[in-house]
Amino acid sequence: MRTLLECYKILEEYPNGMTKDQFYRVARINKQHAKYLLDFGLVPCINTGKKTRKYHIATHDVITYLCDREDHPEKYKVPTGFYIGKNGCPKRHSDKPVTEIIRFDFTEPEKTGLYTLWENLTVGYDDLLTTPVVSELTGYSAQSIQRWCNQKILVGFKIRGTLTIPRLAVVEFMSGDRATAIVRKSSKHLDLLRTYAQDCHEGAMTITY
């Protein structure tokens, strides 16, 4: 997950925006993917029409994309066939490392069971939790938890300047589709879902490369 420190470093390094080449390196994607995101408006940019340095991307738009990509990976996927070459064969990127992608797809009864699991995990905790406690429970950084609250996808409010999150809000979020679909899960969250999926239907967990 992107931390506030990482975001500040990107802003510090690219205070006046960045080119497409700088963007794809920061985002850790290939050039074709970067061009797709820019041409189709998934990442806002200014197209100067020049042959070189054609695109100008505001740094804050890059940071917004990086954060949103973690919660909504499907939104930024390249459509099937986008990389088909002139000879009709897919373009190969042999230098790109193979990444294991783990997805979870629970049935409605299994989602209810996951909710119950998170309820049991939080038994004994106070009804209102601080950010460090939520971080300990979920394995995610305090910055991620703060961002989720800012985006209104996790309920949280401040009491005397301290971010406070209802225990049941954590249970609801962590057992819901938004949390299950996070690409870069914390090791604690991933281990919990792996273990739970073993007792679910056969297709509850799929691994692709």
Image (cartoon, rainbow, N blue to C red):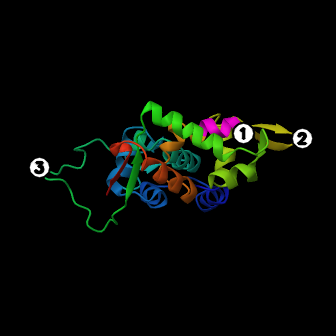
The residue under label 1 is 167
Q: Amino acid at mark 3?
A: Gly
Crowding near pointer 1: few (<14 within 10 Å), some, many (20+)? many
1 or 3: tag closer to the N-terminus: 3
2 or 3: tag closer to the N-terminus: 3
**For discs 1 and 3, the disc positioned in front in the rendered view:** 1
Crowding near pointer 2: few (<14 within 10 Å), some, many (20+)? few
Could you tell me which secondary element the residue under label 2 belongs to? loop
| Residue 209 pos. (x, y %) | 31, 57
Could you tell me which secondary element the residue under label 3 belongs to? loop
Q: Which mark is residue 88?
A: 3
Crowding near pointer 3: few (<14 within 10 Å), some, many (20+)? few
1 or 2: tag closer to the N-terminus: 2
Looking at the image, is 202 positioned above or below residue 94?
above
Q: Which mark is residue 28?
A: none
CB contact under 8 Å: marks 2 and 3:
no
Could you tell me which secondary element the residue under label 1 belongs to? helix
Looking at the image, is 176 positioned above or below residue 57?
above
Magenta span:
168-173
Does the stretch in magenta take in 172? yes
Q: Amino acid at mark 1?
A: Arg
Q: Taking 34 as reference, is 116 left or right? A: right
